[in-house]
């Protein structure tokens, strides 16, 4: 009998498992070994501090972000007073899982099958990778952290089968140093309808490698062709491809994260990826933390209402940021004309400073209210075409 079984052990599941194990609960986490999620790999300073990420996990430190418009215009945004860390999910996720094990969580390698219930408790069935046998573990609570199209969410949580998402695809390639238009300390974000008609493309350094990819919610769009075009434009077309990966990325937090009984969701399974930016690692780990808090409250009190604490805690801190980013995506990702204006808006120094302060610290900055007013007015001017996009 476990107190908690965590299904999925990416950043959300591994974080939840570690925190619960450190709190003295008997925890098991079930993970499909060998799966690597496509991810740009950016982690802000707040994540590094809050979750005690060692420097050796950072494969690159980014000091500049470049925004590229549909016409090829570029805006370089310096990251003042710090850097954005880059991780490789192949190693970062393993690090988090190992840390959960060191905290006392028990690891099972296999594929989730289903949840059953009887008088003895909640039964989680999975197929063991080594033996191929079906194994059942009994628990008081399940945390579903098994990704955007979560089997746990679809089976257990109302609305869990209707989460909107884009498909992200990237290629990890060898990129040993400055090549063509590529710089190992700069992240490039490409807003171009030919690369992605409804999202964006990216070229993110990972030290000796790089992540080159894009995302879209349109069926039938040529993801590999768009990524090849990105590689060519960046001077990376001749670099060796190490691996190719694709996966769904959720676009909106679910309205409900628990089943009112014995299941609570975390990470992509709950839909906590930031709109507009697609940032997910930080929010996944926060999702794991709030799921662990809800689990602790439930286990201590026996009240199923405690499971709602996970979503409530997350939204208290991040709801406004998510709303602002969703509004930006809806306003600017609709056409190349709008994308051109978005990149033009990013040229503004007030936008740059407040955007990166919010990104680095994960909260809207309130210290300069007049700057927010100015940005609001500039945003309206750009959307209505009152200002020119010619900022060269």
Image: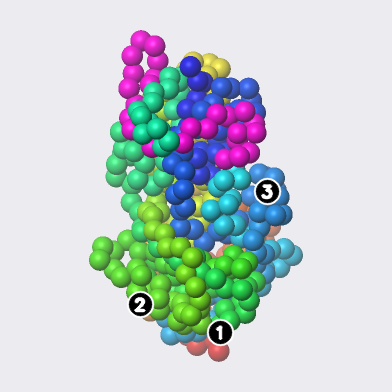
Disc 2 designates what residue? 194
* Label 2 crowd (10 A; few <14 / some 14-19 / many >=20): some
Question: Label 2's element?
Answer: loop
Q: Residues within 10 Å of mark 3 (few under 14, many from 20)?
A: some
Tell me whether circle 2 and circle 3 mark residues in contact (CB < 8 Å).
Answer: no
The residue at 53%/16% (across/down) is 301
Name the disc covering residue 53, or none. 3
Total numbered circles: 3
Magenta-drawn segment: 97-125
Along the line of sight, the residue nearer the viewer: 321 or 219: 219
Residue 391 or residue 95, whichever sits in front: 95
In the image as oriented, which residue stretches furthest toward the top?
Answer: 119
Quick check: 80 above or below 259? below
Q: CA distance from mark 2 to mark 3?
A: 37 Å
Query: How far is mark 1 from mark 3, CA to CA?
Result: 32 Å
Q: Main secondary structure of the magenta part?
A: strand
Q: In the rendered structure, which disc, 1 or 2, sits on the residue that comes first in sequence?
A: 1
Q: Secondary structure at mark 1?
A: loop
User: Is 364 positioned to the left or the right of 330 in the image?
Assistant: right
Q: Position of residue 363 (x, y in %)?
A: 60, 52
Q: Nearer the viewer, residue 380 or 27?
A: 27
Quadrant position of the C terminus in the picture: bottom right
Measuring from the top left, give residue 338's x and y in whole percent: 40, 75
Q: Nearer the viewer, mark 1 or mark 2?
A: 1
Q: Earlier in the sequence, mark 1 or mark 3?
A: 3
Question: Circle 1 is placed at which residue position?
Answer: 180
Q: Residue furthest front?
A: 131
The reply to whether residue 114 is in sight is yes
Please state which of the two labelled residues, at mark 2 or mark 3, is closer to the viewer.
Answer: 3
Residue 282 visible:
no
Mark 1, mark 3: which one is toward the viewer?
Answer: 1
Residue drawn at (49%, 65%), measured in percent from left and top? 242
């Amino acid at each position: 009998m476990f107190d908690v079984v965590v299904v999925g052990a990416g950043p959300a599941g591994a974080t939840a498992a570690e925190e619960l194990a450190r709190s003295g609960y008997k925890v098991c986490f079930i993970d499909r070994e060998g799966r690597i999620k496509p991810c740009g790999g950016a982690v802000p300073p707040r994540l590094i501090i809050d979750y005690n990420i060692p420097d050796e996990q950072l494969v690159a430190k980014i000091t500049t972000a470049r925004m590229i418009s549909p016409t090829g215009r570029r805006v370089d945004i310096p990251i003042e007073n710090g850097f954005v860390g880059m991780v490789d999910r192949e190693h970062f996720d393993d690090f988090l899982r190992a840390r959960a094990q060191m905290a006392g969580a028990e690891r099972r390698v296999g594929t989730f099958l289903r949840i059953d219930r009887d008088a003895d408790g909640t039964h989680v069935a999975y197929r063991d990778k080594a033996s191929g046998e079906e194994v059942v573990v009994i628990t008081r609570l399940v945390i579903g952290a098994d990704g955007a199209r979560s089997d746990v969410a679809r089976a257990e949580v109302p609305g869990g089968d209707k989460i909107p998402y884009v498909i992200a695809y990237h290629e990890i390639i060898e990129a040993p140093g400055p090549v063509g238009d590529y710089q190992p300390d700069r992240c490039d974000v490409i807003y171009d309808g030919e690369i992605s008609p409804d999202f964006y493309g990216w070229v993110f350094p990972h030290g000796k490698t790089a992540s080159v990819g894009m995302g879209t919610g349109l069926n039938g769009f040529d993801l590999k062709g768009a990524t090849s075009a990105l590689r060519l434009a960046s001077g990376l077309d001749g670099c060796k491809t190490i691996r190719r990966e694709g996966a769904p990325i959720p676009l909106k937090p679910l309205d409900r994260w628990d089943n009112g009984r014995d299941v609570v969701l975390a990470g992509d399974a709950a839909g906590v990826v930031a709109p507009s930016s697609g940032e997910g690692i930080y929010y996944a780990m926060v999702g794991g933390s709030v799921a662990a808090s809800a689990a602790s409250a439930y286990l201590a009190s026996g009240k199923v209402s405690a499971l709602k604490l996970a979503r409530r805690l997350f939204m208290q801190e991040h709801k406004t940021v998510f709303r602002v980013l969703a509004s930006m995506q809806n306003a600017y990702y609709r056409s190349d004309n709008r994308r051109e204006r978005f990149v033009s808006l990013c040229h503004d120094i007030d936008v740059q400073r407040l955007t990166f302060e919010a990104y680095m610290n994960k909260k809207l900055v309130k210290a300069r209210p007049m700057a927010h007013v100015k940005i609001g007015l500039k945003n309206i001017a750009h959307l209505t075409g009152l200002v020119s996009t010619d900022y060269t």
